[in-house]
Amino acid sequence: MAAVLVGQFHARDAEGRIYSVHEFQESTPAVDGSGPVTTYKLAIGDRVNKVDDNEFQLVQTGVTLTREPQTASVS
């Protein structure tokens, strides 16, 4: 089973630190047939659980992260 990077975003903890979060999809669908399994990890490899659309929690420490709003880039 392999995971493919499908996205990345920044999230901030309560103390203002910013983390780079990577979103992966497993190459095989979930056992219950509900579609691909999505997992999250920090750029340094720490696992992250998704709580809701904009809230995540570091597995190792329990620190809550909030997804930063995406800003439009100006070219």
Image (tube, grey):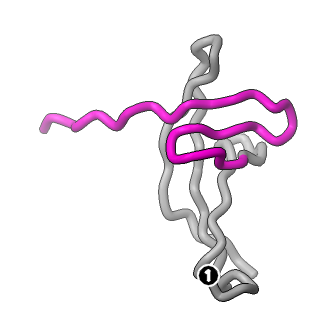
- Residue at the top extreme, as displayed: 15
Instruction: Identify which residue, 32 or 14, lies in the foreground.
Output: 32
Q: Residue at 70% of width from left, 77% of height from top?
A: 2
Q: Is residue 23 magenta?
A: no
The count of marks equals 1
Instruction: Identify which residue, 52 or 71, lies in the foreground.
Output: 52
Disc 1 residue crowd, few under 14, some 14–19, many 20+, Cα 10 Å = few
Q: Quadrant of residue 56?
A: top right
Compared with residue 75, is residue 41 higher up or lower down, i.e. above or below?
Answer: below
Q: Residue 20 in the image: x percent, y percent?
A: 57, 37
Compared with residue 40, is residue 43 higher up or lower down, i.e. above or below?
Answer: above
Q: Which residue lies under the disc numbered 1?
A: 34
Q: Quadrant of residue 72?
A: top left
Tell me where the magenta segment starts and ends, as one range. 49-75
Q: Quadrant of residue 32?
A: bottom right
- Left/right of residue 18 with respect to residue 58 in the rendered view: left
Q: Residue at 76% of width from left, 37% of height from top?
A: 58
Q: Quadrant of the N terminus?
A: bottom right
Q: Quadrant of the C terminus?
A: top left
- Left/right of residue 72 with respect to residue 57 in the rendered view: left
- Left/right of residue 52 with respect to residue 64 in the rendered view: left
What kind of element bears circle 1?
A: loop
Q: Residue 23 in the image: x percent, y percent?
A: 57, 56
- Amino acid at the residue labelled 1: Ser
Compared with residue 31, is residue 14 higher up or lower down, i.e. above or below?
Answer: above
Q: Residue 3 in the image: x percent, y percent?
A: 66, 71
Q: Residue 64 in the image: x percent, y percent?
A: 69, 29
Q: Residue at 59% of width from left, 38% of height from top?
A: 55
- Residue at the left extreme, as displayed: 75
Q: Residue at 67% of width from left, 60% of height from top?
A: 39
